[in-house]
Every structure is written in C-alpha cells, then in structure tokens.
Amino acid sequence: MSGNAFGTLFRFTTFGESHGPAIGCVVDGVPPRIPLTEADIQPWLDKRKPGTSRHTTQRREPDEVQILSGVFEGQTTGTPIGLLIHNTDQRSKDYGEIAQQFRPGHADVTYWQKYGIRDHRGGGRSSARETAMRVAAGAVARKVLDALVPGGVVIRGAMVQMGPHAVDRAGWDWDQVGANPFFCPDAATAARWEEYLDGIRKAGSSAGAVVEVEATNVPAGLGAPVYDKLDADLAKAFMSINAVKGVEIGAGFAAAGFTGEDNADEMRMREDGGIDFLSNHAGGILGGISTGQPVVARMAIKPTSSILTPRRSVDVHGQDVDVRTKGRHDPCVGIRAVPVAEAMMACVLADHLLRHRAQCGGF
Amino acid sequence: MSGNAFGTLFRFTTFGESHGPAIGCVVDGVPPRIPLTEADIQPWLDKRKPGTSRHTTQRREPDEVQILSGVFEGQTTGTPIGLLIHNTDQRSKDYGEIAQQFRPGHADVTYWQKYGIRDHRGGGRSSARETAMRVAAGAVARKVLDALVPGGVVIRGAMVQMGPHAVDRAGWDWDQVGANPFFCPDAATAARWEEYLDGIRKAGSSAGAVVEVEATNVPAGLGAPVYDKLDADLAKAFMSINAVKGVEIGAGFAAAGFTGEDNADEMRMREDGGIDFLSNHAGGILGGISTGQPVVARMAIKPTSSILTPRRSVDVHGQDVDVRTKGRHDPCVGIRAVPVAEAMMACVLADHLLRHRAQCGGF
Amino acid sequence: MSGNAFGTLFRFTTFGESHGPAIGCVVDGVPPRIPLTEADIQPWLDKRKPGTSRHTTQRREPDEVQILSGVFEGQTTGTPIGLLIHNTDQRSKDYGEIAQQFRPGHADVTYWQKYGIRDHRGGGRSSARETAMRVAAGAVARKVLDALVPGGVVIRGAMVQMGPHAVDRAGWDWDQVGANPFFCPDAATAARWEEYLDGIRKAGSSAGAVVEVEATNVPAGLGAPVYDKLDADLAKAFMSINAVKGVEIGAGFAAAGFTGEDNADEMRMREDGGIDFLSNHAGGILGGISTGQPVVARMAIKPTSSILTPRRSVDVHGQDVDVRTKGRHDPCVGIRAVPVAEAMMACVLADHLLRHRAQCGGF
Amino acid sequence: MSGNAFGTLFRFTTFGESHGPAIGCVVDGVPPRIPLTEADIQPWLDKRKPGTSRHTTQRREPDEVQILSGVFEGQTTGTPIGLLIHNTDQRSKDYGEIAQQFRPGHADVTYWQKYGIRDHRGGGRSSARETAMRVAAGAVARKVLDALVPGGVVIRGAMVQMGPHAVDRAGWDWDQVGANPFFCPDAATAARWEEYLDGIRKAGSSAGAVVEVEATNVPAGLGAPVYDKLDADLAKAFMSINAVKGVEIGAGFAAAGFTGEDNADEMRMREDGGIDFLSNHAGGILGGISTGQPVVARMAIKPTSSILTPRRSVDVHGQDVDVRTKGRHDPCVGIRAVPVAEAMMACVLADHLLRHRAQCGGF
C-alpha cells in the first residue's frame, strides 16, 4: 500500500536505495515447477547494466543477482522468490555537495516535502537503480509466460525516438536492435542518433526518448475490466518507470485524429478458425482485454535531469541556489529504459495470465 | 481482483450492465462527518448525462442517484456508501440484430473470448454507461478533498482536441468551458468544432478527441513511489476509461524532444517560504509525488466505434459478416469523457490524500 | 481497505445499515457460465431469517434478494454480481430512547469513539443485519464450489453448545439439524435446549453458543501459506461475525493438552492411491493447506448483549446512565449464526479454490 | 496474494526457507523519521532464538538481522525496510532420510499435494524458522506504535498452559515471565512445568500450550469493521502462526457459557472524562474496534509434531512407511511462540493505527 509492490497474483515487492548495501525484491505467486536459476535472470540485468557503451553512465555495477529462496534444485517451489543484488560502486561522495540541494527535475524536493527526510545519496530510493529489480522480476515473469503459454510469449522493445529524432519505421528490423547501443531497430537511424547523442553528451546536456514494446503470441482474453484493463495496467506499469511522462497503446494519441472508419480494426475469419484482424490500431487490446494480436505500447521519457548547465533551485534551508549536477549520468536514460519497459510488460502479462486462470481457468 | 474496484483507501467498487435493472457503486474509506447528500452528486452526473445537446447520444437516462447507506442525517458515518442508479431507457431491441456479431473496435469479441458468454445488450458491462458510477464516486471524492485540504482542491477538465483539430491555447478561458457543448475553453475553437462535428454526425461517422484535466491547490507530497506514483495511478485511472488510448502528464510526449536544459522546472523561494516553480513541464509531479503545482494530465480518446458505414467483421458462429451500427451513439465520446476524467482525477487525489495521511500524518 | 470487503479472488463488498433503505453486496471474481438465479440464494437467506420460531427475534424481514447485474439468461457472465435487499421493517422508534446511550456489549461506544458519529438506529452498520449479505455471498460461493469441484463441496453447520450445555456428540445425526429450531444435531439435546432457552427468554436474558461447521469433499491443496493459510482465513472469517469471541480448527484448544503421539493424524495409503488419515485432529488442514479430510471449524458466540436487566453505562454526553434494552432481540444469536458461519466457510473455500487455480492450475 | 505478506498499510512480506541461504522480509508503510537500528530488532530475535535453555531446540542460529534499506542515519525514511538474516546452521543431512516421507502433523504432505514439489530440508518454507521474520517485523511495529501513540503501547505475552497444566492465575506476576525459560507468569507453575517438560523431552515426546498476549494503552477506535475487525485480524494473525489451532479474544470460548448479564462489561465515567469499564470480558474490543481497555488474546498450540515414537505415514512414492523424527526439536513449540505472538499483535495494532489515521485522522 506504500507503493513498493507491483501486480496482484504475479506480484513483486522491491526495496533498496541507490547507495545502500543492497537492493532486493520478493517475487510472489510464481507457479511451482518452473525451471529457474540465476542464469535466467542475469542476461536481462546485463542488458540494462550501465557502462556498456560511452552512451550510458560510466558507473560500474556488476549487478550480480542472487536467488535466496523459492527455488529448489533448479525449479520454483511456489514459495516467494527472494532476489538480492549487492551495491558495489557506492561513490556517494560524488553527491556530497548537493546533499542539501534540490536538483531540478529530480524527486529531491518532493521526497523532502513528503517524508521530511531523504537519503540524498544518488537519489536514494528515487534513483533509477531501483529498476534493476524490475528487470529481475521481469525475467521471472518471462519464465512464467513461457511455461504457461504454448509457444511462449515474445516481448521485445526498441527505442523509436531520441530527442526530436524519430526512427525511420520503413527500415524497421528487429535484428538491428541488438546491433547498436541504442536498441534502435534501424541501422541508419542509429547512426544519426549516435552523432546526435555524442553532441549532447559533450555539452553536458541530455535528451529524451520514446520507447516501444511489443508482445506477440499473447493469448486472447487477458485483462480484467473495467478498472484493471490490460492497457490500464500497462499504462501504470510504464508510467511508474523513472522519467516517463506519457504512455500510448496501439495508435495512441494519433487515434484522436482518426475517424471511426479509419480506426476500426476490421476482422475476418481465418481458415484455422481463428480471427484475423486486418489492422492493429487497438494495439492488441479491446475493452481492456487482449485480442490475440500483438500488444503494442509506447512510453515517452523526459531528458535526464542531471545536466552540467547550472539551473536555478532551492535547498533544504529555504535558500536560493544554483545547481549543477556533476557525477556520472546517462545522457539519454531512454536507452537503459528499454529492458525495463520490456520487463514491466512481462510482469503485467504474467499477472493477467494468472488472473485469467483464476477466474476463467485454462491455458 | 477482478477489476471492478478502483483505489486503495478511497476505494469504489462498481457493478451493473448497460441494459440491466440498475448500475451501482460502493464507495469505501470515506472519512466520517463529511457533509454529503444526493445533491452533491447529481450535478456531476447531469454534466455527463446523454442528450444534453445534438452532439451527444439521444438516449434518455435521467441518471438519478440514490444514496443507500453510509450517510446519516446528512453526514458521512465512515461506513460504506452505497449508490444506485436505476436504468430507465433500456431499448435493448436496438441491439437485437447485432447480438451475434462482434462490432469492430468494441469489446464484443474480447468479452466473448475471455468469458465465453456476454450480455450483448448495449455492450453490457463494457458499455460507457459504467462511467456514470465513476462520476458519482468522483463527486464523493471531491467532498473528501474539500473537507481535508484547506481551501479545497479545484479539478476541472476541458476538451483540447477534436478529431485532428487542436484548441487554440492562446484563447484559453476556463469560463468558456461551460458555455459550449464541447467543454472547449476557447469560443472560436468551439465554433469550428461545431461545424466539424455536425459533418461527422450527418455522415454517420465519428471523431476522436484529447481531454485535459487540471487540479489546482493539490498539496505537495501526494503519491506513493515507486509503483503507486501519483502519475502512475493517474495513467491507470485515465487509461481505464472507455476508448482511451494514451495518457500524458505535463509536457508528456513532447518532453521526449526536449533537452535537459529546456525540460528543467527551475525553482526559487517565495517570500512566504514556499517554493516557486518557474515552469511546469512536470505537470505537478516529480518522482511520483505532487510538487504543489497544478497537476496536469491529458488523455487521447479514439473515435466512437459505432458508425453507420459497414465494416468487415465476424460473428459468434465463426462467420464473416458486415457490421453496421445503428442506434443512438455519440459522434465524439470525448465530450462526455470530460466529467469522467475529472472524476477519476478526484478519486486518485482523494486516495493518495488518505494514503499520505496514513503514512505521513497531517493535513 | 476500510473493512467492508472479504476475500481476494472470490471477493464480496457489502454496504448498508440496519435501518437504512437497503443493504447490498457486490460479489466479484465469479467465474463465467455458472448457473445462478435468485432461487439459488433465497433459501439460505430464509434459513437465517428472523421470526421463524419463538426462539429468534420477532422482527419481520422478508429478506428478498434481487440480482442487479452479473447474470445473463440465468448464467454468470464473469462481471460483478450486484445483490440488493430492501429493508422493510424499520421500526426505528424502538431505539429512540437509547439513541444517546451506549449499550454495554454493543459497538455503540466504539463506533462513537472511532467515527465521532453513528447511525444509532438498531446498531446501524454494526447490526447483525449485515450478515444477511454474507449469507447471500455464501450462496454464490456454493455455486462456484459446485461448478468447479467434481462432486461438489458439502458445507453444513450445527450448534454444538447453548449456554453451558454442550451437545451430546454420541447422538450426532446431521438429519436432525433441520428438525429443530436450534440447528442441533441431537434430538435429545435439542429438547433440553428448548427448555433452557425458554427460561432465558422469559427472564429477558440471553445465552451464548458454540457453532461448528464442517466442509466435506474439499480438494487437497487449498490454502496460501504462510499468512493466508486456510485456517488463518477461516479464523478471520468467523471472528468477523458479530458476537464471536473464539475460533478453533479441528481439535482446537483441546490440542494444547495433547502429547505429540496423541495429536498425530497418522496416514496410510488407500487402495485407490489416495491417502487415508486415521484421525482428524488437524481439522483437515496442515501447514495452512487442506488435506482432503473434512475441514472442521468452530466458533464461540457471546450471549446477546441486548437484555432487559438494567446495566450501568454512559451516554454521548459523558453522563452515567442505566441501560435496559427493550425491542425484539434474539435470546441466543448463536442460532441464526449457523447459516452465517456456513456462508463464510463457503466464501473462504471458493476464494482459495480460485487462488489455487491461479497459481497451481487445475480443478 | 500468494500468502507471504501480512497487513495492509503496515505490511510486511517475508521469504526464505529453513535451510536456504537466508530468510528476509520487506516492511513497507513505516512512517518516516522514526528512530530505528538493528539494536531495536535484535533483542526480540534473541528472545525467540533457539538454544537458550534445554527446553528448546539445540539448533544454533545466531539470527543476526541486517537492515538493508529504508533507514538513513538512524531514522526511517518512509521507504521499504529490507531485513535479512543469513542461515548459518544448515545441517540438512539431519533430514536426509525423511526427504521422501511425509511426517504426520507436518505440512510435508500438503505442500506436496499443492505444489507437486517441496524443499524438504527442515520443513522448507513451512518451517517455524519463518517466524523469525515476524519477530523482526514486530520489532519495527513496536517502534511505530511507540512513535505514534503518546505513552507508547505495551505488548507482552506469557504462556498460560503447558500440556494439560494451566497457570495459576492467582500468582500472576509479569516480572516472573522473564525469570524462567517458559515465559510463565507464576514461579510455582513454572517449577511444575519444568518437571513436566523434562519428562516429555526425555521420552522424545512433545507438549501443546496456550499463549496469552496483552496490549495496554491501545487507543480506542482501532479496527475496521465489518470484515477487518481488530479481533478478526488478530485471529488471522495468530492462526497463521505455525501449530496454532485456536484463538480467543477476552473471555473467548468461556463467553459461550455466560448469560448476557454476566458477560456485559458495564461502564462508568471517570473523573477525567474517560470511560471506565468495570470488567473486560470483551478483551478490549467491541464491534471489532478497540475500547481503550487492554486487548487480550490467546492462542492454542498443538504439540510439536516431530517426536521420536514411530508414527504410521506414507511417502512420495505412495508407500506406507513408519516415520520417526530425529534431529533437534522443541519439545514444546509454545515456548518460542510467545515472542512471535507478541510480534503479530504489534503488527496488527500498527496496521490498524495507520488505517485509523488514514480514515479518521488524528493521534
């Protein structure tokens, strides 16, 4: 109830601050007898890990995850899965000089207003470091989906806009996503982004981004209307990620400009008895329930608030100050948000899969 | 857990189908000794009511709400507030011919896929008729906010885009919102929209929309990071409204194109000891917690799926059919979504106010 | 979160006061395509109804339940089931003279202390009238259990102690339970109780009771350790019933006096491959999970607090007063608590059945 | 939802198995700026720790707790508090020979039936080892109560029955509780119990117990009727503790034998304007809400199921076996259950304190 857990039946609870001894997570509700080891989780953490290119923060966090419970002889037991990552690169002195200041765009001021106290080291609880545990939980969710959905569910994300520069969708190739440091699905776009971001980084500035995630082979029927619609839960999941300011499903804001004729996803029967949708403006969700089409969601990420240019601000003593954020920061947090968004999609789908099983049985 | 309740401490649970005997709602968690009568709820329902102009559906629903419990001698008692609205205009024969068909863009097909049964009369549970109870719950939430926040919280919404036509923000005047049938804050824009929508309606077509809601005098400190951030809960609240496909907070998707310098909302101390923000790209929320600035959220609504032009579809027997939706429909559901969005904002704020009181005391 | 809902996946939310216009309930999470009409609910309400013999209150409440939603053409649709009972016998003037007084043993004083306001008519929300909706929800739960468990689950309760007089278990015959006004499983005991209770009633006094409920054909595997153990949820369910002061599972408090040798429920394989337990001190639950044996639970009910003999008390003005409760009261509330306890058992089992289905599949 | 969390606003989630690398806990909802260090938690763990006398298991578990998050410079920050205890004495070979067998009275058989897999080492998740984290969470709850309730809340427990031998209540002296290995409030009784338990232990047998917990200076008004009554939540809390088979509030089962005249707790005004109750059969709770009197609850604990005498059972292969449990076991688990029951009482009260604050404000 204090906001540190996500999901209902597939539910994870996280704890930990940026510069504390460790961050951790309890994943509850996982069905028994699903194969799971650290090796199922670590690759996703590595994908999010800082320092993999010059385009992300140069902090060094090996982010080695340890399973503390809930797994016996390589299989889940149905009991809660405790996950732990020790923090190793706690150079908290970097933050010393701004301990009393509120960095604009950061949660410094609101944590102070809400709690009257804050762990100022690296953002404390509000740091995006917390998202590592989302990725770990998401890795478990993927295992659940693969175990319960015949053929498995494929969830993959990409950056589709960096700063003002949108990807060229005509060149979309999922294989490209792993071939550049931006999770960009178009090689030509990636090259342009590289140049753009080098400029941003050298200027000590930062850039926003838009990330898109797609899930395919999602069974029809997932979602719990009317308040826990699949898209409502996805919107919450994405909006809860650090720096996210907008979420769309399918056509999203563009749908506002459509007419009813344009927007309708027409249907025809397939020969195998399934339903063929002739378009997917709905993003795979109607009335809050999955249609069986790909589920498509996007999120807008604001530029990193930590920049070198001084900004006007105030401090805990009620004094005007100018804040300049040194330290090691991502020039575009949108990059490392891609695996986080994928993970949240996985968690939402796993949760609704179990919820569907409870009420409607099956799979 | 089956998706028919919203909120945690200020929590409402709704029931009822479009063409059943009644729709209802239980509002739980309301503090005691808050003045409340039907007269506090009815005006908001009237604002959402169909048939108020030629631009909304011509169904006649008086939507008279009855308080069944939780109020004694004009004051809340702290016990659950039962609300009921009888359905009076149940012309379900209008829907007879499409009882076996799946209307494109509607939830017909997914309810069938999920539950294997559906109340096909007027959309049943998936009908926007359900949003009447959101408005009723929102009216109670407003009373809670007014009772607990000194000076009260002002929540007001407006349509800012109809079809492809955005409002002229230079002409924004909140007083205009009640002066035209579109909740449009600019008279000149309203005139253009009227012409546009007349064309749409006469063609049996439909238009999408964007709605913006603003809450002022929101105390700083509301929101429960990291998963129940204020913006995350708003995103869920808005995305759970029928036909919504996108949600933004503050600058929203535009923030993706900003640099860190542009995006920062700089701060200076006010003479009274409060903090002055020099801009509000954040939409009044940092790190998931309210800053004290106006909370600003928008949502994109797809065009009404019920249109006269035949669309290709399938039926419950697995046959291809062409569907043409007659009956009485809103050419732009975005209009009547304005009071619904306001209500959801009120409910989210009331919920987080109580949550804040639980953990941090005060107010 | 304000205490008016019970259960997680099979979840019901109630509202309504003793002397308001109606009481109601929303049952959520019910699987679709289960046959359900008012006729499935009414008989259980009739069993709890007052005025069926001279041994219960002479209030007249027909308690006619109406299904407002969630059912279409005689089958559940998976959407929330709204249930309503209008209050008809609201002789609130009976309570007029004690409106300002706190009746000892009643919740008058604590509602006042908590909320600073109370609906004093007939106990308001704290009245056992609320339990009618538990019985209605329990009737739905029975339908869920019967639909999902092959062979159905049988849930039946009995009074096993009235005042200081325990039933003679040697004479236990379930068929007797319906043959006397006490739900007593032994005819000879029932005769003794009748005499005893006539004396109590004529003296304007009241008697406590112990009620036992047994569920047979419960599948092994239900329960969610470690905090939502099946017995923990049963304990909460029973203790939440008005006037209950103790709960036991299986051997209960007697187990404290056993040795480990005596207490062990030994096992042997059955020829059909199932497990035969040679005793059932555990009451069908081990480690919080059902064993497949009968689930057995008991609850102790204090004597009705409304008695004719004056008791010392205080009033809302802080004055000492003597309170004498006239009106129409049950001399032994334990009698009408039997169908309520059965209903709560049904709800707990239905909830855990759905929870088990979510995590472990099956049934 | 899978049963590994307790509480709503003061909520803790535990994980870990008896013989895994660690057990842990996340405590969420703790108000900010409450002093907290490991030294506030460790003494309560030490009280529960095995091996403190010959009357408890001789396993050696230092049970050193580490705070991983949620505390900054000795104060809570309002963020989740991660707690960890490493398991050090994992002599799992002790359990090797019964890995395939179901020990009567243990959860071996039901975990197998539910999950189809179990961590058989020392009971795995079903081991009472889990209760260490309850004690840790309870220590945090005590700090919350002390910070928010003027004068603090005193919670203390005692054993009131060992095997068939009840304490002599005439000799009750809280100071004695810490002076003997049984948490017995009467020295003479403790001497008798010592002799009795020596006999039980030498015979390789075990004894049940009854534990009583009392909380004083509990504010009036705590509890959330009608389903989350304070006593209902206490009943669930106690019944969720390993080996508990019964729970009572106040007079408990004895109340069933009372008349209404005997049972009434009469009231008189105190000179200071408070209410004086002339007795406390209610155990400090009316209508599910605290009265301000001491909250009194008891629980019955079955004898330890691990005994030396062979018992008939079955194994995972469906074979009849005779099980004899060697290893190091508590002859009377009731002893070490005392601090666990105290902890659960603390957690329930802290939870309802926050819930009350949310709805009714104050303290």
Image: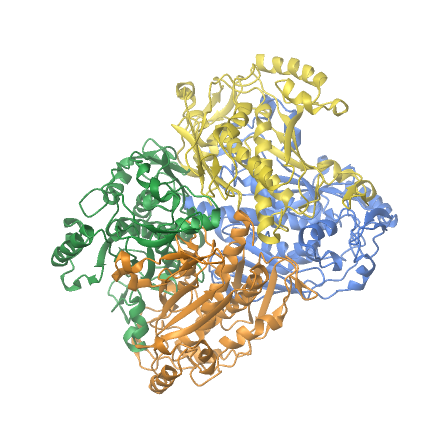
Chain colours: A blue, B yellow, C green, D orange
Residue drawn 11% across the image and 58% down it: C188
Q: Is residue C67 left or right of residue A148?
A: left
The answer to whether residue D61 is above or below residue B311 is below
The answer to whether residue D157 is above or below residue C52 is below
State whether residue D114 appears in this view: yes
Residue D182: % across, % down: 42, 79
- In the image shown, does C211 or B131 lie closer to the viewer? C211
Count of numbered marks: 0
- In the image shown, does A86 or C184 lie closer to the viewer? C184
Residue A204: % across, % down: 86, 49
Residue drawn 41% across the image and 32% down it: B118
Q: Quadrant of residue D27?
A: bottom right
The answer to whether residue C66 is above or below residue A348 is above
Residue A94: % across, % down: 81, 61
Q: Quadrant of residue D275?
A: bottom left
State whether residue D1 appears in this view: no
